[in-house]
Amino acid sequence: MLELSSKIARAEGSWAARLRDGLGITRSRLSGLFTDRSVDPALFEEIETALLASDAGAEATRFLLAALRARRVGTAEQLKTALRAILVELLAPLEQKLDFAGKKPCIIMLAGVNGSGKTTSIGKLARYFQNQGLSVLLAAGDTFRAAAREQLAAWGERNAVAVVAQSGGDPGAVVFDAIAAARARNIDVVIADTAGRLPTQLHLMEEISRIKRVIAKAEPGAPHEVWLVLDANTGQNALNQVKVFDDALGLTGLILTKLDGSAKGGVVCAIALARSQRPLPLRFVGVGEGIDDLRPFAADEFVSALLD
């Protein structure tokens, strides 16, 4: 038992370090501002510049600065403590626990633009759910790109997970067959890939909406989760992606990928503020290419990686 606890502690420590490294650009801009100095207009200007450079966006930056000024603290260290508390409060609604109770198979549909890391995220999700004691089946719903099918098949082999796929053909039919296979095999979770598309490609957005309708016919009440995969390097364009995909699909969550040291991470604040009336959970964040480099989002952990 002690050995297991030690392994878990090492894994969590390693994850915290990787997340900290992944947000290194923003942390380097922010953490150095709160040295032994007075709280004056110059400091607030520097904080504003750092937040804008971190992809927080104009609205979230104004919100954070206003909240900071309202605290009326006397030292830079107190200001940092206040910023931490404000950020955690802003991001906490994005941290929501998954509940698969009464959903078997639980069907998760993933969407996103080309290059967002969608297929790779599916492979990592398969491993994560397996580690939670759940059986998984993958549906290669991106029938347009042979490379996507091959990539998903490789992840399936790596995880010893079945992949339902076909060359070309209708993506809805592939997902339909995958759901039938999952029921027959008593599988807990089905993760369905879809072809990458730009929000401006209206005909493709309609196609992905049709896949969702096919899933609903195959399994009443499904898909149970519809997640948008966002590249952390996308910046403020992520807000537009969230809006368009949510309008088309009714998103239930987000995955933020590629927090690999070049990403800034502040867009999470912009998304949280924009969706403050109807929070959209940030289900997972990814920091690298390793199979275990995708973990559930935790607001306090994320803020620590931004500031410390």
Image (cartoon, rainbow, N blue to C red):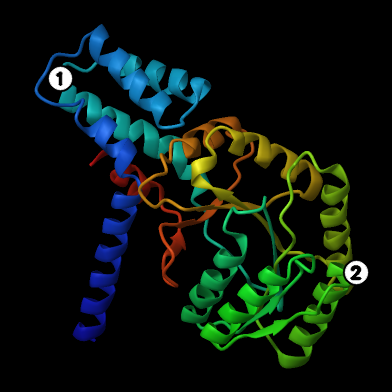
The reply to whether residue 103 is visible in this rendering is no
The foreground one among 175 and 216 is 175
Quarter of the image containing the C terminus?
top left
Q: Quadrant of residue 304?
A: top left
Q: Where is the N terminus found, in terms of image quarters?
A: bottom left
Residue at the far left: name it.
36
Secondary structure beneath label 2: helix
Determine if residue 231 is in view. yes
Disc sitting over residue 306 in the figure: none
Determine the secondary structure under disc 1.
loop
Q: Earlier in the sequence, mark 1 or mark 2?
A: 1
**Left or right: 158 with respect to 211?**
left
- Mark 1 in CB contact with mark 2 (< 8 angstroms): no
Image vertical order of residue 113 relative to residue 32, above or below: below
Q: Position of residue 194 (x, y in %)?
A: 74, 62
Q: Is residue 277 left or right of residue 97?
A: right
Q: Give percent across and percent down for residue 74.
A: 17, 16
Q: Residue at x 80, y 79 (%)?
A: 166
Look at label 2 and name its amino acid: Lys
Considering depth in this image, is 160 or 185 the residue closer to the camera? 160
What is the crowding at mark 1: few (fewer than 14 residues within 10 Å), some, or many (at least 20)? some
**Amino acid at dot 1:** Thr
Q: Position of residue 116 (x, y in %)?
A: 59, 53
Residue at (49, 51) in percent of width and height:
95
Residue that carries the numbered disc 1 in the rendered image: 75
Position of 115 with respect to 46 (left or right) is right
- Residue drawn at 17 percent across, 22 percent down: 76
The residue that label 2 is drawn on is: 217
Classify residue 197 as left or right of residue 295: right
Q: Residue furthest front?
A: 146
x and y percentages locating residue 12 in the rendered image: 29, 66
